[in-house]
Image: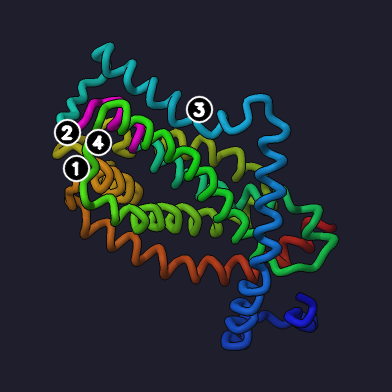
Amino acid sequence: MNSEMQEIVYTPESPLKDPVKMIKSMWHDLKVSRELAWRLTVRDISAQYRQSILGVVWAFLPPVVTTAMFVFLNQSKLMNVDSEAVPYPAYVLVGMVFWQLFAEALQAPLKIVTAAKGLLVKINFPREALMLSAVLQTLFSFGIKFLLIVAIFFWYKLAVPWTVVLLPLAILALLIFGFVLGVLLVPAGALFNDITQSLTLITTFWLFITPVGYPPGESGIMALLAKYNPVAPLVSTARDWMISGSFTYLQEFLLITAVSVVVTFIGWIVYRVSLPIIIERMSA
């Protein structure tokens, strides 16, 4: 491990003045941070469930409780949703699990940087380890929640379409889109708690304008919101590939995924350039 560490020389010059050198350094730090990222992931997951009475049950509760709320509203006729392809509870639960993947990916970068403030100001290590750990923890949480989808498919004896083989692409798209937004929030969020506090409100509102508990409409305000909501085609496509095997939103899905991949690299640069300033502010 020590043989892979680079000598670091701090200067007042911005790393953006030498982009080639900066990209090489970013790639190097990403490679050497894999072991540390794994250790951080194991530590954080172990601590999270060891200090909880219900343990992994907390991973199941958000999608289950929200699904139960949507089902109650639908049965009470406060909502009028007709899901012909599958029973309504299965329709909502599948959408909620994929929504939770996006929401947790959005919150993970800021959450892990905030939790590591003490470590950042005391120890010099590849900062990419924090982001890799955030990705691994998000995927671990999603893996637990995905068991709910497996269970409900068995419960209702639902057929699995061939498009399920494309599901990893949909999972990756939701993860990347949420994660890159989260990384872009790190510079401001690590210094101002208002960002962290407002994220819960934003994701709650965002959930209800995303077709999770209802299909995207063809007209009206909800159809308009779904049209300009970038998460909508990602969640809808993931659910369609899991349930019906359709490709209704394929064009929008591919466009948002492609843009997310490009913006991910930009977000990485923003994180890389801004983090030393953030650490300096935190240690002041």
Indicate the quadrant containing the C terminus: top left, top right, bottom left or bottom right.
bottom right
Give the residue pinned by disc 4: 222
Rendered location of residue 70, percent (x, y)? 34, 23
Give the residue pinned by disc 2: 85
Q: Please check the rendered image and state whether residue 83 is part of the magenta-colored stretch, yes or no.
A: no
At mark 3, the secondary structure is helix
Rendered location of residue 170, percent (x, y)? 34, 54
User: Label 2 is placed on what type of residue?
Assistant: Ala
Which is in the foreground here, disc 2 or disc 4? 2
For image coordinates 37% across by 56% down, the residue present is: 168
Give the residue pinned by disc 3: 61
Q: CA distance from mark 3 to mark 4?
A: 27 Å
Q: Earlier in the sequence, mark 3 or mark 1?
A: 3
Above or below — where is 199 with respect to 178?
above
Judged left or right of residue 33, residue 165 is left
For image coordinates 61% across by 65% down, the residue present is: 271
Q: Earlier in the sequence, mark 1 or mark 2?
A: 2
Check disc 4: other Cα within 10 Å, few if <14, some if 14-19, many if 20+. some
Q: CA distance from mark 3 to mark 1?
A: 26 Å
Rendered location of residue 67, percent (x, y)? 38, 26
The residue range painted magenta reads 86-94
Above or below — where is 202 with respect to 165?
above
Check disc 2: other Cα within 10 Å, few if <14, some if 14-19, many if 20+. few
Give the residue pinned by disc 1: 244
At mark 4, the secondary structure is helix
